[in-house]
Structure formats: structure tokens, C-alpha cells
Amino acid sequence: MEEFIKEFIEYLIIEKKLSNNTIMSYTNDLKLYNEYIKKQFNNISKEDIIKFIAYLNNKKLSSKTINHTIGTVKNFHNYISLKYNLKNVSLNIKRLKMNKDLPKTLTIDEINILLDIDCKNCFDYRNKAMLELMYSAGLRVSELLELNVNDIDLNDNVVKVFGKGSKERIVPIGDYATIALRKYIDEYRICLIKKGTITDKLFLNNHGREMSRSGFFKLIKKMAIEKGIKKEISPHTIRHSFATHLLEGGADIRSIQELLGHENMSTTQIYTHVRNDIMRDNYDKYHPRS
């Protein structure tokens, strides 16, 4: 099993060109699977996989986490079975049914409050540039933190983004983000670079290295609390808000799909439900005969 797993992970890296975070997720899922199964690949049965899913349920994992692991296991079995002409015992394994939660968003007023940063030092200017860019381009947190300086074109007001599967897209950015980025890059980024080090990463932490996802998550939560924003907030909240505000402003769903870098339209269509909720709330609040 270990050799098959290693081969599958190499396939994901070399052929599929998945991101480091995705590779790590697949690796962790299959490590857990292998530790539970304790069998050679061609001795695994459908019942073994069903028992594994029950084991995950007993660990009180979320349906989303379990479904991700099921997807990993099915992809693994499909790849190995096809390559070595073995029976695919995972074919009829179903994912758990789960209710789709609508993504949480900030209002435009809340976004304005969050982005109204009184810049006094290099960290303030960095934070301002990061959040303005994230909201302006609707970036995933991984896309934001992996940016290099040369990925930003302040003359044409665009950012070159490498999304899931290393797929490149060019996304326009607004004037507020452009101004904040120019200020940070030209005057304050140099303050974060440690003596004797060279880095192309756009956003740096206090050690002069690329900021981590957990570091950014803590930062944005701290800023929201300081700004008096009561909602539970994460980096993805800003991306959701970007998409929802575009839709509210009249943008078509196909354009939003391209901007977000969604491969499937179905992923983007959840924002139409967010918009319908907002429309219903406004109707109930303002229509005289609601």
C-alpha cells in the first residue's frame, strides 16, 4: 500500500500539478486510510471502506471532512485500479449527504470598516495592501500569500494569480488596492526584509519570510475584533464578500466564475443563493405590504 500511495502522490504532483496544500491534504487522508485498513491493495473490499467511513464518523469529524477523505480514497482506488487493471472496490461508495451552508459575508459597510486602517508603520501598510488586494481581486488565502512582487502589474492594474492546480489567471484590481500596493511595495516592504536575505515574496511576516495561512488567519480575526465587527470572520469571508458584492452590483455569474478561478459553474452558483437571501431580507424590511 505504501508504494501505491507514494506513486499516486507523485502522479498528483507531477501530472496534476496540485498545490502543496492539496498534496498535503491527500497525503494525510491516505496515511489515515492506510493505518486503518492494514491490508494489501488487492485485498481491500468495499466493506473495508464502509467500515473506514464509519470509523471517521465515530471520530466526530464534520461531514465536509469525511467527504473530502472519501473523495481522496475513491481517487486513489480509481488511479491504481486503472493503471494495474485491478478491481475498483470504491466505485459504488457514496459520499455523505450534507446541507450546503451559505457562505458568510460582510456587508459593504463592514468591508469599508475593516479596510479603514490607520497606517503608522510597515506592518499597517502591509496589512492594508493585503486586505485591499484580497477584496479587490477575490483571492483565496493561498493565492494571496504565494504572490511574488512581479505578479503585480501596477501600470495595468492587474494581478497574475496561480490558483488550484497551478492554473494561471489574470485578475483586475481596483484603484484602492493599487494605491495601497504601490505605497507598500515602493516604501514599506523593504522594512520587512531581514539583512542578508533575498526574497521575491510580496507579503512578508515579522521574520522577513512568507506569511503563513495561520498567521494571516489570526491577523484578520484580530483586526475584525478591533474594528468591532461581530461576525465570525476568516480569510474566505472576504472572498465570499467580493463575489456577493459583485453579484449585487449586477455582474453576471460567468464573469464572477472567471474572476474567482472556479472550474465549475456549480461552485459559483451558490452566490446566487446569497443574493436571493439579501433580496428577501430587503423585501421584508422595505416593502410596505411584505
Image: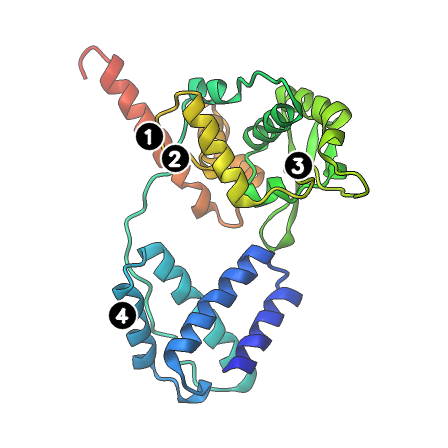
| Distance of label 2 from label 4 (alpha carbons) | 34 Å
Residue 220 percent coordinates (x, y): 49, 32
Residue 263 percent coordinates (x, y): 53, 50
Amino acid on which the number 3 mark rests in the picture: Phe
Q: Give the residue at mark 4.
A: 54
| Distance of label 2 from label 1 (alpha carbons) | 6 Å
Q: What residue do we see at 55% from left, 55% from top?
A: 21
Q: What residue do we see at 26% from left, 13% from top?
A: 286
- Point out the tag, 1 or 4, that comes first from the N-terminus: 4
Do the residues under discs 2 and 1 have CB atoms within 8 angstroms?
yes
Q: Give the residue at mark 1.
A: 276
Instruction: Please indicate, yes or no, whether residue 221 appears anywhere in the rendered image.
Output: yes
Which marked residue is nearer to the observer: mark 2 or mark 4? 4
Q: Residues within 10 Å of mark 3 (few under 14, many from 20)?
A: many
- Identify the coloring: rainbow
Q: Give the residue at mark 2.
A: 272
- Which residue is the extreme one toward the front? 195
Amino acid on which the number 2 mark rests in the picture: Thr
